[in-house]
Image (cartoon, rainbow, N blue to C red):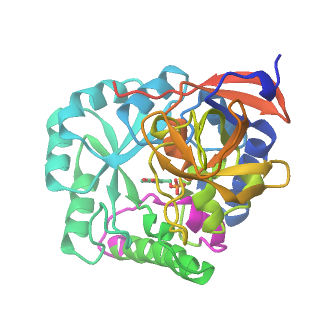
Amino acid sequence: MSDLSNLPTPALILDRDRLESNLERMAQKATRLGVSLRPHIKTHKSIEIAERQRALGASGITVSTLHEAKMFAAHGFDDITWAFPLILSRVEEVAELASRIRLRVVVDSVEALAALENLDTPLHVWLKIDCGYHRAGVDPQSSRATELAMRISQSSMLTFDGILTHSGHAYRPGSPAARLAVAEQERDVMTELADGLRSAGIEVPAVSIGSTPAMAVIEDLTGVDEIRPGNYALYDYTQVELCSCRISDCAVTVLTSVVSRGAAHSVVDAGALALSKDSGPEQEHGTIFGRFFYDYENGGVSEDVLLTSLSQEHGIVNKAAPVGTKFRILPNHSCLTVAQFDEYIVVEGDQVVDRWRVHRGRS
Ligand SMILES: Cc1ncc(COP(=O)(O)O)c(C=O)c1O
């Protein structure tokens, strides 16, 4: 086995000890708060990581694409929530997969529900609720929420799994108190809606919520049955800025080399197709696309040496450094960074101990 110093770059490096601590901490939190954990695997797209999450008690997994659902089903995951508004052009594939595993789909429209009813296939269905993020989901105050829940629960082919939401607005800049308010709002909107639906005679089997920043701050999940955080497995610089974790919890880095040196800048082999163009949290110096570690063990990242721009394969560093210098970059958004690579190089300390495939794709 080799060590980090002689790996070809760019490479996606996964720190196994940090991953393990992150997985254990969230599993323990779910147990402490009395909820099941159904991790979102879109962050890591790794069978090995999902197997570890399952061994630590995950009740099933969440995916964002049908490709992920198919890949993980092919590796023995048989209880999968596709937490994305149903894509009508893919319902035949949904039916096929649902004949092999317990596939749970998400709807927030009459059109999607009608497409499922027309399939005439038994399916598990969540009703997606907008808890304040305003991306997708039914307004919990609207009569549509009750009408759709009633229609799913009365269907002979569909099984109503309950109501599901995602607190993506926990990512907006603000204080930890503001994030706690978002997390509490997510919980309260959902438990109040569940109570309202139950009073209208609709059985609501479960309430499913979750994002990593909300789960980092919430300590009371009374009335909630399931949480679906994903990013917590790996974390990233955005989560550090949101106080969800410390830099020394971040489990993925991109190993890169200086390939060209100018008078006052250098170029590394980590561009947008290694890191993504996620601009991360707002910064006073303008957009920074990744942080360079000077002390990986203790979570030290440079405030002076910065990745200031990206093109497809080039990353521009604001300081001159000798060609061949290697850096470890902390990405702004680990989910998008991982999706640029075919495999993780798994390390313990500086030693490479394994290689795990990233199941990315669009089929
Ligand atoms: C529907 C849904 N559930 C759960 C998650 C997980 O959130 P996070 O990545 O903050 O843990 C996401 C992330 O985008 C999501 O879209």
| Range of residues picked out in magenta | 197-221
Determine the residue located farthest toward the top in the rendered image: 1
- Whether residue 41 is visible here, answered yes or no, is no
Q: Is residue 151 left or right of residue 135?
A: left
Question: Residue 177, position in %: x, y?
Answer: 60, 83
Count of numbered circles in the view: 0
Determine the residue located farthest toward the front in the rendered image: 263
Q: Is residue 86 above or below residue 46?
A: below
- Whether residue 59 is visible here, answered yes or no, is yes
Please state which of residues 12 and 346 is positioned toward the viewer in this rendering.
12
Q: Is residue 1 left or right of residue 286?
A: right
Q: Is residue 130 magenta?
A: no
Q: Is residue 176 above or below residue 346?
A: below
Question: Residue 128, position in %: x, y?
Answer: 33, 58
- Residue at x 61% of width, y 29% of height: 10
- Residue at x 72% of width, y 35% of height: 326
- Residue at x 40% of width, y 70% of height: 194
In which quadrant of the rendered image does the N terminus lie?
A: top right
- Residue at x 28% of width, y 55% of height: 153
Question: Residue 241, position in %: x, y?
Answer: 62, 67
Q: Is residue 80 above or below residue 164?
A: above
